[in-house]
Image: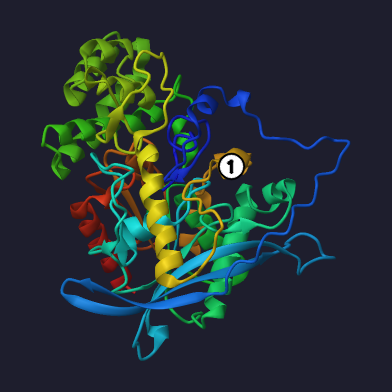
Amino acid sequence: MGLVCTIRLFGAGVILPISLCCLAAPAFAQEHPEAAPAAKASPSAPEAKPEPLPPLPADASTAQTVTVNGQTLHYTATVGVIPVYNPTDPNKPEMKTGEVVVTSYTVDGVKDKLDRPVTFAMNGGPGAASVYLNFGAIGPKHVQFADQGDSPSDPARLTDNPGTWLPFSDLVFIDPIGTGFSRSLVSTADSKKFFYSTTPDIEYLSRVIYDWLVKNGRLQSRKYLIGESYGGYRGPRVTHYLQGQLGIAMNGLILVSPYLNPWIESNGEISPLPWMMTLPSIVAAHLEREDQLTSQRMADVIAYTRGQYVTDLLAGRSDPEATPRIIKKVTELTGLDPAFVKYSGGRLEAGAYLREVHREKGEIGSVYDSNVTAYDPFPFSPNQTSNDPILEAIIAPTTTAMVDWVTRVVGWKTTARYNALSYEVARSWDRDRVLERGSTADLRQAVAADPKLRVLIAHGWDDLSCPFMGSILTVDEMPVMGDPKRVTVHEYPGGHMFYTRPGSQSMFLKDVEAMMAAH
């Protein structure tokens, strides 16, 4: 999970970015963000020092097995804490400001562990724990969530994950401060300064990776980083910071539904780019409902989007036939009500589309996958006033599965609250101008600095929170810098969390394994 790439934090339409996955703020706050301002301390009274928290347990490990393609792997699962220290006060450099909880899986019986790659994983939000990549995508165990028909009250039972990366890489899942069991130990104001701001977030998470490598004697291992959604924003910046500041070079970077380049989705009044982002994903969802979704059909859609569609959008009223031509073609491609397409001018805004496409059934689609729906509890409201269907359904199974696994199976006993998605972190986040610029500059610089670095960007076709078309256009504007296959974009059936579909997860697994094998 991660951040919603349309600068709508948490998915449901909030004006903030998040990775989901992206978090979605409560509906009222989404519609009226000014109605729920962050609490501020009185200027005349200094903020009270937070009460000391009960200590977190010592690191705990357990021996586990997973069967993949008939092969049984023996591995050690460890839950532990990496402390974070004051980065700004020269008089208190050793003051512990936070504790990051990390879950790692390392294969047993390896003759030389330095021959094993290690992959670091983080989701986004800001406010999402890494459980989605862990139990949904690449960890050795899996829990069902985020598909049509899944219920929050379904049993959250873990099974062996056929799509795990453990056969070819050890895995380390990082929960940023405020997510999972990770926590700040300082005041609200200092938490925002140290953790809930764009650049400090990159710096302390990079240091967590550095510290894990030193602690576990893995500095000489090949190293990879996977980030989903807002974690996909973090990925290039963490890679570049590690490379240029901490002296740790990543071999590969995998970005899943990344919040990579937000500026291209603004200025829809004069720029065609926002409409170029949404159209292909909406068409993909329609083709999927019609059982006609193929790579060739999507190639045709992409060609139209980059050709006649953008030409007609730019023409505007200078060509009287441009808008009628758009409306006719978009209606044909999407299967939407011709009147809806006509009155939108063929410019399909994601929120309006999600309410329209399933309206006759009284349902609303998810911004993360518009073919995953839920009943709309307020169907006559002029705007969406409920949370996103996927976000409403994922917190219970992932939280239940993770807390049970950590406390009962691993034996890391704690009574602290687990935050699969933290709305508090989302509300507190400082969305500054650095964030608005995205992380493509860091991506370019990291690739330029290391001629062996490889980058795989992965998207689901149906995702409207971080549409795949944005990454295609972004990568196509990058200089080649050697082998053009060093930076690639891959699309799969599904949405933001396309990996919840077994077929897409299998294709993703093969693509990543091939990328790592290139090293």
Hey, which quadrant is residue 247 in on the image?
bottom right
Residue 102 sits above or below residue 424 on the image: below
Q: Is residue 492 among what the camera can see?
A: yes
Residue 395 sits above or below residue 184 on the image: above
Residue in the picture at 52% in, 25% down: 28
The kind of residue on which mark 1 rests is Glu
Q: How is the image coloured?
A: rainbow
| Residue 249: image location, x then y, percent | 50, 71
Hey, which quadrant is residue 400 in on the image?
bottom left
| Nearest the eye: 169 or 270 | 169
Residue in the picture at 50% in, 34% down: 25
| Residue 335: image location, x then y, percent | 18, 22
| Nearest the eye: 11 or 219 | 11
Hey, which quadrant is residue 372 in on the image?
top left
For the residue labelled by badge 1, is the local secondary structure a helix, a strand or a loop?
helix
Q: Which residue is mark 1?
A: 424
Residue in the picture at 65% in, 54% down: 200
